[in-house]
Image (tube, rainbow, N blue to C red):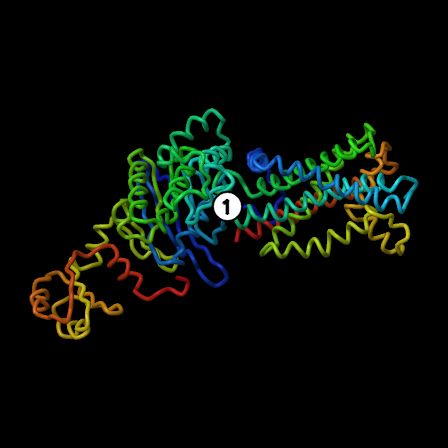
């Protein structure tokens, strides 16, 4: 049978060459990419952290630059995965027809969507690692628990990649992604306690924030980066995993619908 | 009697109310080149997509190498090579990398891939372009690289969807030579094309598709003999319409397309004698060919989607 649109993901090891393909392209552009990954947070942290931070002083009992830096890592995981799974995946899917050529080989669409999700998460991890290096070098934090943030950031990358692939499957052009950033990602960033605490917001809005994946990622990553173990890790982990699984499944169904008419 | 590599039986595919493949049956034997010709929208590409499991069928059955499709499409694809109508080469990779990366999709080991890549570049006449990216290649080179890529898994069956569309004559001839080479190696080819000379030159058997239906099947010569008069006289020029009216009785069939009148006949001499003194026309006497057959079977009108 041709895979039914709603069938459970059918994965094989053939997803791996697709991840390797994307890694090979990335390697060709690795130097500017890594430099950008390091320069961007370096500039932002220095400018806002020390600049705005000197006006603000302490937030939630920590220096503003600590607050900002630890939140920025989580945002970076989300943004990097989202960019890769929207613009780059869309190029491969709809513009370059890379997916079409892969589908003529014994690789199924389920493998490709999984590979794109995984690759976007790997790429997000690259940029998070770069920021952690900047945080380490600037001396914002030198806590060993920073290393524990990496698997959490990988999970956040998977979550945001899966959500982005839903919109990738629906897109008719790059313009569509502007809505996703303007209406979903940007408001979510402001509601997730990255740049400022949300405690002064109306209670209903705080309730909304409680179920946002970026808020969950920030709640886990901030203490880990700054040398603490999160007090209540279960709920945010479940939120991230829940968005990841349902996002991936929905993305798969919509992508199948897009391809197998 | 060997088993066919590909057997399609009563295949039907609908998009809404439109039937794009209509009760199509065909077989390809080992080492055979089967041509599928038909106007745009006749169902050629859709049929190939269904064979690859990229579109679902509404009826009928397909077997490749004795395996039912789409159930075992992944297994079958290991033995199939595909060249699509539009190049889908990886623009970020060199020619050699395109071949290597594609080989990995088939699960080939590094050693096998490294051994095959130089041979495939050689086959595609791209040895000197191994380090060039597709953007630096001509149209013909890209098509040959696509063909080379389709051979990376050493397939038994090739599905080629208009592999020479958009190429100049030199590039087409080189492509034909490569395809003949593959047939001599014993590979089977399903070829769709709009070029009748290509179909005549390469294909052992032809299927004419129109509106998703098979309307004729046979060897090129047999099809021409079956459906057409042996000779054609084409008449052009100011006096052509008058000539058509005056000499219609000398031909079995007369067709007018734009400024040109086609006389289909078995004995050309009476007509040629009658036209000889007419200075308001030019004419050409030639044997009937596949293009005549194609136009007779599918009509001269332009299709909506053409």
The x, y position of residue B36, in whole percent, is 34, 50
Question: Which chain letter goes with mark 1?
Answer: A
Q: Residue at x 62, y 57 (%)?
A: A175
Quadrant that contains the C terminus of chain B: bottom left
* Vertical comparison of B285 with B218: above or below: below
The x, y position of residue B160, in whole percent, is 38, 45
* Vertical comparison of B280 with A87: above or below: below
Residues A87 and B135: in front is: B135
Which residue appears farthest toward the top when viewing the image?
Answer: B111
A124 relative to B62 in the view: left or right: right
Mark 1, other Cα within 10 Å: few <14 / some 14–19 / many ≥20: some
Quadrant that contains the N terminus of chain B: top left
Q: Is residue B66 visible?
A: no
Q: Quadrant of residue B250?
A: bottom left
Residues B91 and B256: in front is: B91
B82 relative to B234 in the view: left or right: right
Q: Secondary structure at mark 1?
A: helix
Q: Residue at x 30, y 43 (%)?
A: B176
* Vertical comparison of B107 with A36: above or below: above
Count the numbered circles shown.
1
B44 relative to B246 in the view: left or right: right
* Vertical comparison of B226 with B243: above or below: above
Q: Quadrant of residue B129?
A: top left
Q: Which residue is mark 1?
A: A100
The x, y position of residue A192, in whole percent, is 81, 48
Q: Residue at x 36, y 51 (%)?
A: B166
Residues A81 and A51: in front is: A51
A13 relative to B176 in the view: left or right: right
The x, y position of residue A43, in whole percent, is 75, 41
Q: Is residue A95 visible?
A: yes
């Amino acid at each position: 049978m041709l895979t039914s649109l709603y069938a459970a993901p059918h994965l094989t090891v053939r997803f791996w060459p697709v991840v390797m393909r994307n890694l090979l392209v990335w390697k060709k552009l690795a130097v500017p990419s890594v430099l950008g990954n390091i320069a961007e947070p370096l500039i932002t942290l220095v400018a806002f952290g020390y600049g705005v931070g000197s006006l603000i002083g302490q937030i939630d009992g920590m220096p503003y630059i600590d607050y900002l830096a630890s939140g920025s890592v989580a945002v970076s995981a989300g943004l990097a995965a989202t960019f890769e799974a929207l613009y780059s995946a869309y190029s491969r899917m709809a513009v370059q027809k890379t997916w079409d050529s892969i589908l003529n080989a014994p690789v199924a669409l389920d493998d490709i969507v999984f590979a794109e999700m995984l690759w976007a998460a790997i790429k997000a991890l690259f940029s998070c690692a770069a920021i952690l290096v900047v945080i380490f070098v600037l001396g914002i934090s030198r806590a060993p628990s920073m290393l524990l943030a990496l698997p959490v950031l990988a999970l956040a990358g998977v979550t945001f990649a899966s959500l982005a692939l839903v919109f990738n499957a629906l897109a008719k052009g790059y313009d569509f992604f502007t809505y996703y950033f303007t209406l979903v990602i940007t408001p979510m960033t402001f509601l997730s306690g990255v740049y400022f605490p949300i405690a002064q917001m109306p209670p209903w809005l705080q309730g909304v924030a409680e179920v946002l994946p970026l808020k969950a990622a920030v709640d886990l990553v901030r203490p880990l980066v700054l040398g603490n173990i999160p007090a209540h890790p279960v709920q945010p982990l479940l939120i991230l995993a829940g968005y990841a699984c349902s996002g991936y499944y929905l993305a798969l169904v919509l992508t199948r619908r897009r391809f197998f008419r | 009697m060997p088993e066919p590599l590909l057997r399609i039986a009563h295949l039907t595919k609908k998009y809404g109310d439109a039937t794009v493949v209509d009760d199509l049956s065909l077989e390809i034997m080992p080492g055979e080149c089967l041509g599928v010709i038909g106007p745009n929208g006749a169902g050629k590409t859709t049929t190939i997509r269904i064979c690859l499991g990229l579109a679902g069928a509404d009826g009928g059955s397909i077997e490749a190498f004795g395996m039912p499709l789409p159930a075992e499409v992944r297994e079958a694809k290991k033995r199939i090579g595909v060249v699509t109508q539009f190049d889908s080469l990886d623009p970020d990779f060199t020619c050699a990398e395109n071949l290597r990366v594609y080989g990995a999709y088939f699960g080939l080991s590094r050693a096998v891939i490294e051994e095959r890549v130089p041979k495939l570049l050689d086959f595609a006449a791209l040895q000197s372009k191994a380090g060039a990216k597709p953007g630096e290649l001509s149209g013909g080179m890209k098509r040959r690289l696509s063909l080379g890529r389709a051979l990376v898994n050493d397939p038994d069956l090739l599905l080629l969807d208009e592999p020479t569309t958009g190429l100049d004559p030199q590039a087409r001839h080189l492509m034909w030579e490569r395809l003949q080479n593959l047939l001599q190696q014993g590979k089977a080819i399903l070829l769709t094309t709009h070029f009748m000379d290509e179909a005549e030159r390469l294909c052992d058997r032809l299927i004419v598709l129109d509106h998703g239906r098979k309307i004729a099947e046979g060897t090129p010569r047999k099809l021409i003999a079956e459906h057409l008069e042996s000779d054609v006289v084409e008449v052009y020029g100011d006096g052509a319409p008058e000539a058509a009216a005056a000499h219609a009785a000398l031909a079995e069939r007369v067709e007018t397309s734009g400024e040109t009148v086609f006389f289909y006949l078995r004995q050309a001499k009476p007509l040629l004698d009658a036209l000889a003194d007419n200075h308001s026309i030019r004419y050409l006497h030639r044997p009937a060919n596949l293009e005549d057959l194609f136009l007779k079977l599918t009509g001269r009108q332009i299709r909506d989607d053409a």
